[in-house]
Amino acid sequence: MPQSRFAALLSQHNLPPSLIYLAPVLPVVQVMWADGRNQMPERAKLQVIIQDHCRALAELAGGMEVVTQADIDIFDRTFVAEKPDPNTLSPFFEVANELLSAQSDEGKSRNDSLYQREKLFQACLEIAATCPADMGDGSNEMFARRIVDAERKYIEQVFELLPRTK
């Protein structure tokens, strides 16, 4: 079960169990790090995304705080502030994607948490488009290259999580 595997990863890295509720943020973090760096506008956008997600979780929990600011700070230090070791990061991303694949969107359509797959997809697109990848020299280019290939790959993985319409 992905939840127990994610909990085991958290324990293995001495991270608080409540970070399981930030698992949906990890694909967004993965898109942010895809070009090998994170830039201040991306970090600022990510903080807004995290705060919105946590606010939505609190609404689902009847107003109770699900993830504390201290937990968000730990998440930031572990995954955002500095580029984490890919060997550490990769298992978290894999299990987070499994956990998200196993989630149902039923009953969450009115909620703005990143458990709603469409919201997660939009968050990934927002992060990817926040900082241009390559503005080009303006000659022979119709558009600036906004999203690098690695970001596109991760966004496509998140797109696969979207529910199929019949």
Image: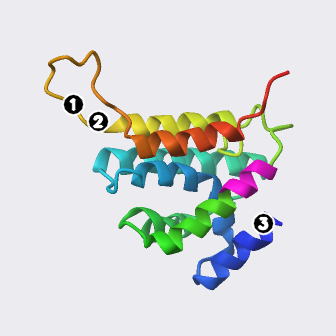
Residue at 67% x, 54% y: name it: 97
Q: Residue 35 in the image: x percent, y percent?
A: 35, 50
Residue at 19% x, 17% y: name it: 140
> Between marks 3 and 1, how big is the CA–CA gap?
41 Å
Bounds of the magenta span? 97-102
Instruction: Please determine whether, in this image, residue 17 is positioned above or below residue 123.
Output: below
Q: What mark, if any, has residue 121 been given in the picture?
A: none
Residue under label 1: 135
- Judge by depth and name the residue closer to the eye, 18 or 12: 12
Left or right for 100, reference 16: right
Circle nearer the N terminus (3, 2) = 3
Dominant secondary structure, magenta? helix
Amino acid tagged 3: Gln
Left or right for 123, reference 62: left
Q: Residue 131 in the image: x percent, y percent?
A: 31, 39
Amino acid tagged 1: Met
Q: What mark, if any, has residue 132 been given in the picture?
A: 2
- Judge by depth and name the residue closer to the eye, 149 or 80: 149
Q: Quarter holding the C terminus?
A: top right
Q: Are marks 3 and 2 in contact (CB under 8 Å)?
A: no
Q: Which structural element holds mark 1? A: loop
Residue under label 3: 3
- Judge by depth and name the residue closer to the eye, 94 or 149: 149
Q: Which structural element holds mark 3? A: helix
Residue 63 painted magenta: no
Q: Residue 146 in the image: x percent, y percent?
A: 34, 32
Q: Residues within 10 Å of mark 1 (few under 14, many from 20)?
A: few
Q: Which structural element holds mark 2? A: loop
Instruction: Please determine whether, in this image, residue 139 is positioned above or below residue 54.
Output: above
